[in-house]
Image: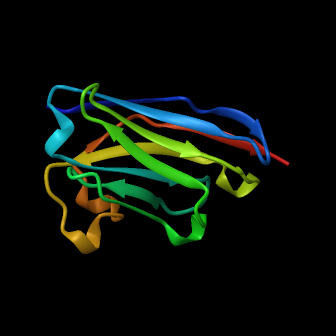
């Protein structure tokens, strides 16, 4: 059973940066597709970025290069570096994992079986 625990959230002013971490246990994630999602109050869950087991990644186009997903398989940890944060980035951020996800669905939350509890990011103007 894969367990995921996010950390690194907090409150930051617009223009600032945060680095989220997602520590995994219960399995080696080196063969898993990993992703970050976020959900703001009253809004649908949104795929932020995903990274494949071979290191290839894709980010939501709306982010315009401000966020970067990465993984360290040696420590079983997923990261999300968030720069130039905006108030509209305020949300609960979740990491997710699944052994296999179809290429065209890797930002679909419904394709992931394992989820963390989330970490809150609040950006003030």
Compared to residue 84, the image places residue 117 above or below, namely above
Residue 38 on image: x %, y %: 50, 52
In the rendered image, residue 75, in percent from the top left (x then y), is placed at 28, 25
Q: Residue at x 25, y 34 (%)?
A: 73
Which quadrant would residue 28 be assigned to in this image?
top left
Image vertical order of residue 67 relative to residue 10, above or below: below
Left or right, 95 with reference to 24: right
> Which residue sits at x=24%, y=60%?
111
In the image, residue 60 sits, relative to residue 30, either above or below, namely below
The residue nearer to you, when weighing 34 against 121, is 34
| Residue 59 quadrant | bottom left
Q: Is residue 38 toward the left or the right of residue 85 in the image?
A: left
Position of the N terminus, as image quadrant, is: top left
Q: Position of residue 104 (x, y in %)?
A: 26, 74
Asked if 65 appears above or below 115 in the picture, the reply is below
Towards the viewer: 44 or 2: 2
x then y, percent, for residue 99: 14, 49
Say which of 118 and 64 sits in front: 64
Q: How is the image coloured?
A: rainbow
Which residue corresponds to the image point at 78% horizontal and 48% vertical from the top-left?
15
The tally of labels here is 0
Left or right for 118, reference 84: left
């Amino acid at each position: 059973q894969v367990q995921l625990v996010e950390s690194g959230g907090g409150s930051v002013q617009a223009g600032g940066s945060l680095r989220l971490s997602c520590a995994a246990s219960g399995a080696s994630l080196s063969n898993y597709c990993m992703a970050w999602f976020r959900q703001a109050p009253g809004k649908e869950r949104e795929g932020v970025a995903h990274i494949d087991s071979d290191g290839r990644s894709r980010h939501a186009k709306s982010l315009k290069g401000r966020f970067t997903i990465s993984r360290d398989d040696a420590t079983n940890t997923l990261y999300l570096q968030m720069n130039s944060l905006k108030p509209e980035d305020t949300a609960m951020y979740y990491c997710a994992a699944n052994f296999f996800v179809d290429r065209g669905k890797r930002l679909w939350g419904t394709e992931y079986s394992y989820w963390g509890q989330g970490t809150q990011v609040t950006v003030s103007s």
